[in-house]
Image: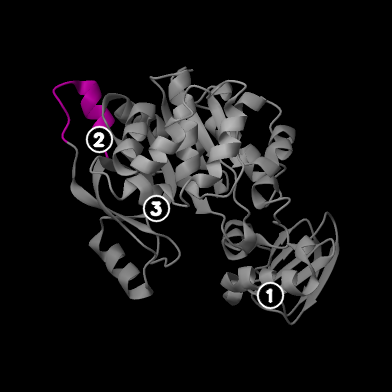
Amino acid sequence: MNKNYYAILMAGGVGSRFWPVSTQDFPKQFHDMLGTGDTLIQKTFHRLAKLIPTENIFILTNERYNDLVLEQLPEVTQRQVVLEPAMRNTAPCILYASLKIQKENPDAVMIVAPSDHWIEDEDTFTRNVQQAFGFCSGNDALMTLGIKPTFPNTGYGYIEYDKAGIPGSHNDADTERSQGVKSVNQFKEKPVYEVAKQYIEQGNFLWNAGIFMWSAKSVVEAFKSNQPELFALFENGIDVYNTDFEDDFIRENYAKAENISVDYAIMEKSNNVYVIAAEFDWNDLGTWGSLYDKLDKDETKNAVVNARTLSEDASGNMIRTKDDKIVVVDGLKDYIIVDKDEVLLIFPKTKEQDIKKVLQNVKDKFGEQYG
């Protein structure tokens, strides 16, 4: 394997839309959401390890999840777990990890990958990432993988790209690496339905999956140019990164970082941003509805994880319990039914975006321990 290949596996989110299974103490990336035998973080780690040396995969997470990471990924050492002492969105932690990686290996190229995506065609994923790495190795480029839209989804941001490809050089290898690479015109926020339809009709829009590739040099330079204050904050620690004194510096300084996403911080401000349309199947497991879409259904179109069900006049439901629990459902259609310890959720799928609000109401009424 190429020793210059690295990964930043993003595993710090809470996943509150998957409550009550996903909680602050035990978020969704550490659960086997689809009943496959692997948790989401395990699945993502093993997918990345097909291309990247395991010792070069860094896990970015909140410090409260350190033990969970080491327990679920026994291949990982403490050196690879990059801990955030405060919640500060994606830009600060990516800059921090990138500076650590650059100090270790100035020739590094890396992928930033969320831990909660579901990708079945892992060989094609590996091929697409390999192509992006090849392009980023030879160019000053910030690369992203976009997903070809299958319908006018209003839940994703979009990437508008230039329909003209990137011209190759006279070198055959350079031409091959740039094939399918498009220059990004602009990023678009989550649209209303009519606008999403227009994007689909135009044909040069992709869903923004939040998967990024770049060289350590390019991403650090992008932060230096576009976020000088943020860069200066973390660059002050360069002497102590990858040493015993790193934790003290981060604990003292991390909370001073601006709460900003990597999209806003550098991707939308840079003029060297490129995209490859992913050729693999992809599902952003962000809600119970997206999980329902991914799972196999029984003869009544219910998606069931772990439970044994007896249903009458019940269809389109997402049902999840502990192993082998018997669930009897009669007269419910398109509901989320999730049974976990002290909480039972029975909620319309059409209102799944309100689960965050419901969670807050539960914590207000019954206590923080239920969130």
Q: Mark 3 or mark 1, which has the lower sequence index?
A: 3
Q: Position of residue 266 (x, y in %)?
A: 34, 45
Q: CA distance from mark 3 to mark 1?
A: 28 Å
Tag 3–tag 1 contact (CB < 8 Å): no
Q: In whole angstroms, how far apart are the C-alphas of marks 2 and 1?
A: 46 Å
Looking at the image, which residue is at 25% across and 35% down?
A: 179
**Residue bearing the label numbered 1:** 347
Q: Quadrant of residue 357?
A: bottom right
> Is residue 353 among the parts visible in the rendering?
yes
Disc 3 residue type (three-letter): Asn
Picture coordinates of residue 200, whole percent (x, y): 30, 63
Please give the residue where the numbered disc 2 appears in the rendered image. Answer: 179
Q: Are marks 2 and 1 in contact (CB under 8 Å)?
A: no
Is residue 266 shown left or right of residue 343? left
Q: How far is mark 3 from mark 2, CA to CA?
A: 20 Å
Q: Is residue 357 magenta?
A: no
Q: Position of residue 190 (x, y in %)?
A: 39, 65
Q: Residue at x 70, y 48 (%)?
A: 32
Which segment is the magenta one?
167-180
Task: Identify the mark nearer the N-term, 2 or 1.
Answer: 2
